[in-house]
Image (cartoon, coloured by chain):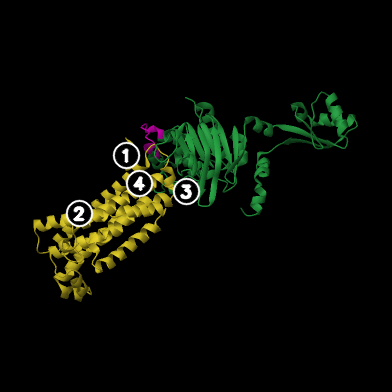
Chain colours: A yellow, B green
Amino acid sequence: MNNFSAALWAETLKMRRSKVPFFSALGFSMAPLGGGLFMIILKDPEAAQAMGLISTKAQLMIGVADWPAYLGFLLQAVAAGGLILFSILTTWVFGREFSDHTVKELLALPTMRETIVTAKFIVIGVWSVGVTLLVFCISLIVGYLIVLPGWSTELLGASFLGMLGCALLTLGLIPFVALLASMGRGYMPPFGWTILTMILAQFIVIMGWGDRFPWAIPGLFSGAAGPRAEVLGTHSYIILLITFLIGLAATYWWWRDADQTR
Amino acid sequence: MTYFAIETNCLTKRFGDVTAVDVVDLRVGMGEIYGFLGLNGAGKTTTIRALLGMIYPSAGNVKVLGQAVGPHGRGPWARVGHLVEHPSVYPELSLWENLDVARRLHGIVNENATETVIEKLNLNEYASRKAGRLSTGNLQRLGLARVLLHEPELLILDEPTNGLDPAGVVEIRELLRSLVQERGVTIFMSSHILTEVDRLATRIGIIHHGQLIEELDTAKLEKMRARRLEVRSHYRAGVLISLESAGYKPAVEGDTVFLEEPYAIEHPDQIAQILVNAGAPPIHLAVQQQDLEEHFMQLTGGSQAREKGQ
């Protein structure tokens, strides 16, 4: 086993043994169930009202009960929920080493620090994409069970690519969370950062500059502010890529060169 | 090629205006047990972190096992075991898993290495217990097991016997001693238990306000550890004459006469008899052994520092 596979094995074991990834995946899996509930309400609003369910809110949020509306809603849920959940996981993967003081056991090893950081990012990426795929599969099962109209294989393909694209764009913002967890040596700074960027994204989208603000791009991609083609351009994806690379480089630099006093 | 196990040249570390380590030159030879002493905040842990490449010097340089320690090198870490402050573990992993993570990250192919070190540290019955549920003493053992897992040539240990009961302290001391004797391992250790350092170390360095203020080599330590008979009498001249004529070689420090001969130390009653017969009866007769703790306190003003709340 070489150093990289050892680091990957170690990160996977920590992930498997912890409750954080499991419960955050469980939480994310609630999105298709919630969307399914809205669809049931929309399909029969009178019956839903009689049962005490809030049909007006469901209609406002989704509109009509069919596959395009359902999958569109889930895409937006992946954009908003994804940023929060991927950030929680990243905060845990990086921040726990400082919070539990285990980082000092990782600094003077034959396995290079960069290798450990790479293994952490890979585990986060695989988990995030895996959970997104899980959400997509649950969506299909829920949609099938509640017999939604408007199904097509084109829609399936587009929704799959949309959800995966949204998850990948969100992952582009993750290195800054990792950097904040490392520099802040714990959980609170990255949490604060995630909330700050989400709030800023709302304001910047309203001001019309969302296509140039990395933290607004996954939301815009999901169609939360209208059809994505009208809002995002190639420059948006380049900005997000640059943000990703800067965050990545800064995290590697910090692990390799910064003083580790805890 | 010969090199020091640890070598620092003008090692200095500043945090803003605070100089935590101030121009420290350390040379620890292979096979030595080097005790590193200092009050809280003296710069011990900062020095240890600099040796391990966890922090980088503001000035000066560090070499460990002949290799420069810096951000761009892999360092000699496959040959070094370290324990900095308290041992840190992944609480959700079992003791065995914690060690196996360390084994793999050290690139040890032999899967039995984990079991071997568990056995060596008497941790068998806790192997499957989650590390978060271990007692402080067993956590310390787990930390030491991780240090020894890859059979390193150099151990850098910060308070290695922290949290251990007296039997555990003795056990770890014997283990460390056997590593030096059987495998020629070099140990650099800091501890606040001065008697522990005194028992183990072949050389001691004392750091105070970031500066290495004294190093006690084997000869100095032996002299300090040597017992002597302390004699005081109203008739010092009579004491000297009578002891010299009895074949002893008395030494004088102030108003006190000292005898270093083993026979005199073992038979103070005979010395008293000689002095009484010579008409110079002793008013004070005691076997004295200088204490490292006493020496350390004198050197660092430890008790005064504590009174000032440092």
Circle 1 Cα neighbour tier, 10 Å, few/some/many (<14 / 14–19 / ≥20): some
- Specify whether disc 4 shares its chain with disc 3: yes
Q: Is residue B142 left or right of residue B38?
A: left
Q: CA distance from mark 2 to mark 4?
A: 26 Å
* Element on which disc 2 rests: helix
Q: Which mark is residue A164?
A: 2
Whether residue B224 is visible:
yes
Q: Which mark is residue A252?
A: 4
Mark 3 residue crowding within 10 angstroms, few (<14) / some (14–19) / many (20+): few
The amino acid beneath tag 4 is Tyr
Q: Which residue reaches farthest front? A: B59
Indicate the quadrant where residue A213 lies: bottom left
Quarter where residue A86 is shown: bottom left
Q: Does the magenta-highlighted stretch encompass residue A172?
A: no
Q: For the view shown, which residue lies furthest in the right direction?
A: B279
N-terminal label among 1 and 4: 1
Residue sitting nearer the eye, A144 or A195 = A195
**Chain ID of residue with mark 3:** A
Amino acid identity at mark 2: Leu
- Which tag, 2 or 4, sits closer to the chain's start? 2
User: Which residue is denoted by mark 3 in the rendering?
Assistant: A261
Which residue is painted at 76% across and 30% down in the image? B265
Dot placed on the residue nearer the N-terminal end, 4 or 3? 4
Q: Residues within 10 Å of mark 4 (few under 14, many from 20)?
A: many
- Residue segment shown in magenta: B102-113
For mark 1, name the chain.
A
